[in-house]
Amino acid sequence: MVDFSKAPEPSEKIGRYRWIIVGLLFAAMVINYVDRQTIGLLKPNLSKEFGWDENDYANLVFYFQMSYAIAYVAWGKVMDKIGARWGFGIAFLIWQLAHIAHAGARGLNGFIFARMGLGVGEAGGFPGGIKAVAEWFPKKERAFATGIFNAGTNIGAIVTPLVVPGIVLAFGWQMAFIVTGLAGLIWLPIWLLVYRRPREVKKLGAAELAHIEQDPADPVEKIAWTKLLTKKETWAYSLGKFLIDPIWWMFLFWLPDFLGKRYGLDLKSFGPPLIAIYLLSDVGSVGGGWLSSNFLKMGWSINKARKITMLICALLAVPVIFAANVDNLWVAVLIIGVATAAHQGFSANLYTLPSDVFPRGAVGSVVGIGGMLGAFGGMVFSKYIGGVLESIGTYTPIFIVAGSAYLVALLVVHLLSPKMEEVKI
């Protein structure tokens, strides 16, 4: 057993066990997004089979986001109370069972109930992931680690059009939920066997533990939401999420529909454009985290490193305003792909704000509050999207909002947290 009371020798090499944790979080996000995106990929087929109009589908997304919003803030508190190991494990089991339950849905109400169960479980994913990163990484590595595990969402979005159409065409849409759901369950026992807090892992070297714990110790006592809600930094994070999360929901749930209506794609031809878009998203997720972490290594302050990176990402998202008016499919794919990459880079840095400025005991709760507001924003935007498509049938107003949201979000973050200083509670 490692003697953690003994300081490592200066020459001792830092281990990489913490990156195994990131690998598990990455895999969980892959599964999460296969489960989440399957409904978007099947929208044209299910709408035809069950007679859904645009508002029906918008309601399906709305109720998923409603349950996600309510559960998200609760999961933040759960993660702070019982930790990432069991908190994430329980959330994963709930969302995976709910995903499988879609196969038994009959009509819109059946899908709504299944989506609400999925929302309850998936709401625990990011609070658990951010909590795990806060436990396993020093501040200077958190944006990069968050960017890596967040990149799993894009891989999940890539895997879905590769796997689901073949299952649907061969065995029907119900088996798409059953096969992917059962396959994903393999992850859970691995997580429970591997994950512990750093000081509970016997294989962890003293050098790596010292690296993880290099930041000044902060209190881990229970912190009431009432205290957190009085802090401007809580609102900086939460309103940022309110503004940008709906844009990602839109890409996830409506992008196949946009490609189908604008360029005539279907279940057999969605694959290459969606894969290209989400590969670009992966570059943004990892690149955004890497860039701000690199700025920190250059001696920049957390405030400057995070916000300059977020500004670059916000500017890269602006051209998506014109995506609906582009006639060439692959030019549109490039514009949308850069915008989704910008979202992921922006999001990776925004996600680090709670762990950058709050004590560890508050991180999960602040992430939960922000996630709840992000989902509420998604609910509002879903209704807007459904109304726009049902009334005028064009994505142009939707993409205008998408291209503007990140600059507005950065302005809000800067006004509420101009220096990103540590919060005293």
Image: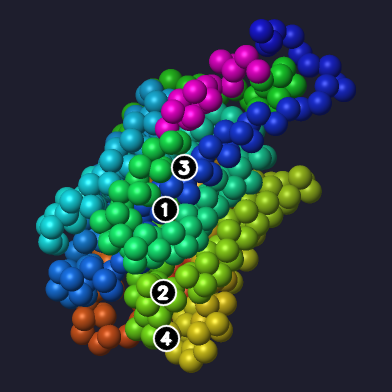
Q: Which residue is mark 1?
A: 33
Disc 2 or 1, which lies upstream in sequence?
1
Identity of the amino acid at label 4? Tyr
- Can see residue 128? no
- The spot of residue 63 in percent (x, y) is 21, 56
Does residue 201 show up magenta in the picture? yes
Question: Mark 3 near mark 4, Cβ–Cβ under 8 Å?
Answer: no
Q: Which residue is mark 2?
A: 268
- Can see residue 113? yes
Q: Which residue is mark 4?
A: 263
SS category of the residue bearing label 3: helix
From the image, which quarter does the N terminus lie in?
Answer: top right
Q: Which residues are magenta?
A: 188-203
**Callout count:** 4
User: Marks 3 and 1, Cα distance to the nearest angstrom?
Assistant: 9 Å
| In this rendering, the label closer to the viewer, 2 or 3 | 2
User: Marks 4 and 2, Cα distance to the nearest angstrom?
Assistant: 13 Å
Disc 4 or 2, which lies upstream in sequence?
4
SS category of the residue bearing label 1: helix
